[in-house]
Amino acid sequence: MTAASPRIPAAKRAGDRVFSGTTLAAGLLILVVLAAVAIFLVVRSLPAFFAQDLELGAGFPTFLSYVVPLVFGTIWAAVLALVLAVPFSIAIALFISHYAPRRIARGLGAVIDLLAAVPSVVFGLWGIFVLAPFVRPFYDFLGEYFGWIPLFAGNISGTGRTILTVAIVLAVMIIPIITALSREVFLQTPRLNEEAALALGATRWEMIRMAVLPFGRGGIVSASMLGLGRALGETFAVAMVLSPAVTINFRLLTAQNPTTIAANIALRFNEAFGSTLNVLIATGLVLFVITFAVNALARLIVARTTVGKAA
């Protein structure tokens, strides 16, 4: 039995070394920037955490009492937007990938991709001048016939600029993101799985339910979490449409609405100074942590989905 000949490593070319060094530097740069942002937020937030005279207004003696309503408003608006956006996004993605003729699917996909690039200020103007007056009669209907439900109780806003209107605007903003990513995932479904389901007598919808949706579950979660991250950090659209208040309120149609962290920072930053500025930076740190936690949770869900497929 002859001994195996030693493996001779291939000589690295100059181009390979430059490329590997560039990619390593780019990866390290991301970590350095992320660490720098985190350190800046922590250092500038410390005075807000320990100070006792923050001058936050009546009813907010401590930073915790001030930030909790902002966290609630941020998560509440983003979750409402996600609940509205995900079903529409999945339906549009399935139509593009499995129902529409190729020419229509190509054009519709291009339109969806372009919608993702529309500036948020444009959506804010649309929410103020078009959407709010349009939904006002619908809000009256909900308040009159479904006011016994706590979500629709209370005095209906006369302007239509409520947390539900903000959620609709945010949903329209994140639908292109979720749709584009879900569409690409659905198109990656193995063709043999689809043909096997059809060969067994499944209808097109049954084939999608048995083959496409299970395969794309991880991608749907990733797309939804990416859309949720966009909704959590949205600033100008929320600040323009909403009549905000630092409060905890589950009612969707009233004039007094909880605001978000990003919108509160945008509205108060120009006039902030001293400890008030530290408070706003501290709320930004809280938003940073929330966004990081959402992305980490998405990675965990996708990893478990991938392991389940492999098993």
Image: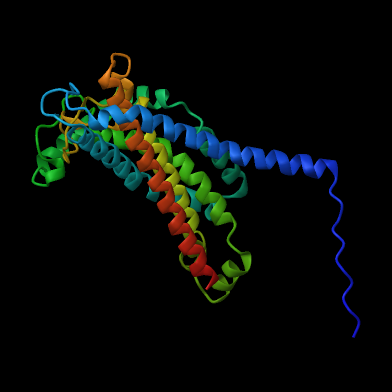
Q: Is residue 50 left or right of residue 288?
A: left
Query: Which residue, as the protein is rendered here, is positioned at the far top?
Result: 271
Residue 225, position in %: x, y? Answer: 42, 47
Residue 77, position in %: x, y? Answer: 29, 38
In the depicted structure, whether residue 117 falls above or below residue 87? above
Return the residue nearer the eye: 285 or 159. 285
Residue 187, position in %: x, y? Answer: 58, 55
- Here the colouring is rainbow
Q: Is residue 284 left or right of residue 58?
A: right
Quarter holding residue 84: top left
Quarter holding residue 7: bottom right
- Which residue is at 87% across, 52% downward? 11
Q: Is residue 262 visible?
A: no
Residue 64, position in %: x, y? Answer: 20, 36
Return the residue nearer the eye: 156 or 221. 221
Q: Is residue 52 visible?
A: yes
Q: Is residue 102 left or right of residue 132?
A: right
Query: Which residue, as the protein is rendered here, is positioned at the far right?
Result: 2
Where is the N terminus found, in terms of image quarters?
bottom right
- Which residue is at 49% across, 36% downward? 34
Return the residue nearer the eye: 56 or 40. 40
In the depicted structure, whether residue 223 falls above or below residue 113? below
Quarter holding residue 20: top right
Q: Is residue 237 left or right of residue 35?
A: left
- Which residue is at 61% across, 48% downward? 102
In the depicted structure, whether residue 125 falls above or below residue 62? above
